[in-house]
Image (tube, rainbow, N blue to C red):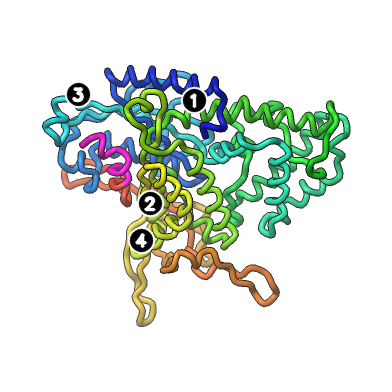
């Protein structure tokens, strides 16, 4: 991304990094980015991360916790006063007291968690204060998909958007916007109401792509779906136009207006986001809801692969040396986590992991080349189900047991949010490549996926208590492995 930033951007990044390194001599910190496309579980992951460290959760694969070397964990004031605070207290109350899932990430937020620990190494105990702060930065993956726009001009953006919109899986959804765009002369005088109508039609198309039954992922500009405090601004009121490639357009035209706003979007929205947040990260976790895409079909899976590749290409990856590390952060560890593993039986966890590794293959190869460590994991930051078996004739089926959310429907039965049930979620394919194959029905339409998952949303679990009446921490699947990979080496 260095080639896509300005000299002033790089100078500011270098100054901020040097200032942060100096402060880190007194108060060491590790900056962890948490991202993923909507409903991948970012808020739940951060809440579970913090809750388990604050309350000494069950983390057998997290060495610092398992060995008893963490003496204390507590929340502190975050270093960035201009960034909204991640509202941990509200989110944990929703999960534990109300047993509802917290609201999804809509904008960037941050929280600092400080851990006091004893190093396992005698040498490190001499050199380290045994205190480390984790600055956890939560941001929408949709915003990250905007970063590649920094290397494109408006005409390229229009051409690529039109090509994408004509794909079979998108053609019906984009029809209204494309019809409107084809009927507008790009050289007509600039007009605010025309720009607004085009923007609204284009945004409606993007939102339709994001719906559950479509589950498409590559939907830039990301702020059109999650505008934050920029909603209604000129920098967010533009759309692609249809025109002959290479044609020169008149000053003061609708095209010139859209082009100016596209450049303003890059200057005032994308560049500050990269400079102030992405360029300061040390570690990164990318959460992926692969099962939703698999249920929507092979085209949704292919689109998820495209989005994941673009997301992972946006980071400054690799290992810096002592000198370059003074002036620039490098993300030296990236975890790609397939979420909602509690929606399938544990026999399919490794298959889910293999599928996501297949989706991220190209991006992982690039990261390996840069020297960054990349791992893939199937996990559930909060486990909403437990496992069991049921007899069906002579066959024994593995099932998951939980309380579906009110309004969820299984086999025609609608649940009230209080009744527990057992379901057979289905099996994932042994060969990851099968998820990219879409069979055709006799009438030429797409058949349902060969390996659908019965995707039911469950309520958060009721926390268990010990015989002494002590409430246990939030249950999870492999959260401890995620923490060990992301921060374990800094607590060694």
Pointer 1 or 4: first along the chain = 1
Q: Which mark is residue 376?
A: 2
Q: Where is residue 149 in the image (x, y as percent from the top left)?
A: 62, 37
Which of 84/438 is in front?
438
Q: Which residue is drawn at 51% across and 31% down?
A: 2
Pointer 2 or 3: first along the chain = 3
Residue lying farthest left? 122
Q: In which quarter of the image is residue 331?
A: top left
Disc 1: CA contacts within 10 A as few (<14), some (14-19) or many (>=20): some
Determine the CA span between mark 4 and mark 3: 39 Å
Pointer 2 or 1: first along the chain = 1
Q: Where is residue 473 in the image (x, y as percent from the top left)?
A: 28, 42
Question: Which residue, given by chain and number where applicable, does mark 4 sit on?
Answer: 350
Magenta stretch holds residue 484: yes
Q: Which of marks 1 and 4 is in front?
A: 1
Left or right? Give the position of 27 relative to 118.
right
Determine the CA span between mark 1 and mark 4: 37 Å
Question: Which residue, given by chain and number where applicable, does mark 3 sit on?
Answer: 129
Q: Position of residue 437 (x, y in %)?
A: 55, 67
Which of 121/46 is in front?
121
Pointer 4 or 2: first along the chain = 4
Q: Residue at x 34, y 65 (%)?
A: 347
Dots 1 and 4: beta carbons under 8 Å? Answer: no
Pointer 4 or 3: first along the chain = 3
Pointer 3 or 1: first along the chain = 3
* Quarter of the rendering occupied by the C terminus: top left
Numbered label tally = 4
Q: Which of marks 4 and 2 is in front?
A: 2
Q: In which quarter of the image is residue 154?
A: top right
Magenta span covers which residues?
Answer: 482-492
User: For numbered disc 1, what is the local secondary structure?
Assistant: helix
């Amino acid at each position: 991304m260095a080639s896509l930033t300005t000299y002033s951007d790089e100078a500011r990044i270098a100054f901020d990094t040097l200032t942060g390194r100096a402060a880190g001599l007194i108060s060491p910190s590790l900056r962890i980015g948490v991202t993923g496309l909507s409903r991948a579980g970012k808020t739940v992951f951060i809440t579970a991360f913090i809750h388990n460290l604050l309350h000494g959760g069950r983390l057998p694969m997290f060495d610092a916790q398992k060995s008893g070397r963490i003496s204390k964990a507590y929340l502190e004031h975050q270093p960035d006063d201009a960034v909204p605070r991640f509202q941990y207290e509200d989110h944990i109350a929703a999960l534990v007291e109300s047993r509802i899932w917290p609201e999804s990430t809509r904008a960037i937020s941050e929280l600092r968690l400080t851990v006091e620990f004893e190093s396992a190494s005698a040498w490190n105990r001499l050199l380290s204060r045994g205190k480390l702060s984790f600055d956890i930065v939560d941001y929408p993956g949709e915003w990250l998909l905007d970063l590649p726009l920094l290397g494109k001009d408006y005409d390229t953006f229009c051409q690529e958007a039109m090509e994408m919109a004509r794909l079979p899986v998108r053609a019906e959804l984009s029809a209204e916007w494309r019809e409107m765009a084809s009927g507008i002369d790009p050289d007509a005088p600039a007009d605010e109401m025309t720009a607004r109508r085009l923007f609204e039609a284009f945004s409606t198309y993007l939102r339709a792509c994001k719906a559950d039954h479509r589950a498409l992922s590559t939907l830039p500009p990301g702020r059109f779906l999650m505008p934050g405090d920029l909603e209604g601004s000129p920098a967010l009121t533009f759309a692609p136009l249809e025109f002959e490639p290479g044609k020169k357009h008149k000053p003061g035209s609708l095209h010139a207006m859209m082009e100016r706003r596209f450049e303003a979007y890059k200057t005032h929205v994308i560049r500050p986001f990269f400079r102030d947040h992405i360029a300061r990260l040390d570690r990164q976790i990318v959460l992926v809801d692969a099962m939703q895409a698999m249920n929507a079909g092979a085209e949704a899976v292919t689109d998820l692969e495209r989005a994941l590749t673009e997301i992972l290409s946006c980071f400054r990856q690799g290992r810096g040396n002592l000198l370059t590390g003074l002036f620039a952060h490098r993300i030296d560890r990236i975890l790609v986590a397939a979420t909602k593993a509690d929606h399938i039986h544990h026999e399919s966890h490794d298959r889910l992991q293999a599928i996501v590794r297949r989706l991220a293959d190209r991006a992982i190869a690039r990261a390996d080349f840069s020297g960054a460590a990349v791992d893939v994991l199937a996990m559930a930051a909060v486990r909403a189900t437990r496992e069991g078996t049921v007899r069906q004739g002579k066959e024994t089926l593995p099932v998951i047991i939980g309380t579906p959310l009110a309004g969820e429907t299984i086999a025609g039965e609608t649940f009230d949010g209080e009744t527990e049930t057992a379901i057979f979620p289905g099996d994932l394919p042994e060969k990851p490549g099968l998820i990219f194959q879409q069979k055709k029905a006799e009438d030429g339409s797409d058949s349902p996926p060969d390996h659908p998952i019965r995707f039911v949303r469950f309520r958060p679990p009721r926390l268990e208590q010990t015989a002494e009446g002590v409430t246990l921490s939030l249950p999870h699947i492999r959260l401890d492995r995620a923490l060990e990979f992301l921060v374990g080496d800094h607590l060694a």
